[in-house]
Every structure is written in structure tokens, then in C-alpha cells.
Amino acid sequence: MIKFAHNNFNVLDLEKSLKFYKEALNLTEVRRLETPDFTLVYLGDNGVTPHLLELTWLKDRKEPYNLGENEFHLAFVTDDFDSLHEKHKKMGCICYENPMMGIYFITDPDNYWLEILPER
């Protein structure tokens, strides 16, 4: 048997990213690994699912990550789509909307795309 464990995003400013994920998606720190060269922080959805987002902060990295054409993303489902959309609009992090499909995307501080879907 195989199951998902986590996805990883590398970040330039760990504290800024932690603040964004808490404010935008209510993700909270589950565990952390500190080393002299890097820090790993695992974020969860408060036990709703077992899936985690691992944020990797390479302490000496200064230049932004090359995300190519940014054709990958993580998706999140919400049972309160309209109010979350309004919150993200106020935060200024919506980067793309597809009203026909009933979805939109937000970007995090490192420009990773996050899809927001209504529960169906």
C-alpha cells in the first residue's frame, strides 16, 4: 500500500511564507527540522487530512527559485468558497480566475500557484 505523505516548496523567506499560509489557508506547523544549512517546516490542515506541505528554507539562498512556466500547483477544497475568495481578494493574492469552472488560483510569496476549489 502506498499513500501520499507531502509536497515540497522551497521558500526564500520562511517567516513570510509561514504567515501567508496561516492567513490565506489556515495551515499550521506540524513539525520542524532545523539544521545549520536548512530548515524544513511541515504544514497541515489541522488534522482534516493527513497530507502535508513541506516548506524548505535553504539559509544561504538569496535568489528567487526558477519555477519555469509554473505549470504545477497544489489544490485546496473549501466549503466556504465565496468568503475565502473575498479574503484572498483583499489579500491581493489572486493571480487567475476561471469563473466558468468555478475555481481560482492564488500565489504564495515565492509565486507558487495554489488552486482553490469549492466542495462539490
Image: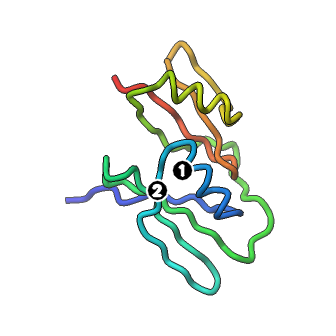
Image mark for residue 28: 2
* Residue 24 placement: quadrant: top right
Secondary element at tag 2: strand
Which residue lies at the image location 79% right of the left edge and 68% below the top edge?
62
**Up-down: is 113 above or below 42?**
above
**In the picture shown, does residue 105 fall above or below 37?**
above
Front-most of residues 38 and 79: 79
Mark 2 residue crowding within 10 angstroms, few (<14) / some (14–19) / many (20+):
many
> Are there few (<14), some (14-19), or many (20+) residues within 10 Å of tag 1?
some
Residue 52 lies left or right of residue 49; in this view the side is right
The percent position of residue 89, horizontal first and vertical second, equals 65, 28
Q: Position of residue 116 (x, y in %)?
A: 50, 32
What residue do we see at 41% from left, 55% from top? 44
Q: Identify the amino acid type marked 1.
A: Lys
First of labels 2, 1 by sequence position = 1
Image quadrant for the C terminus?
top left
Disc 2, disc 1: CB below 8 Å?
yes
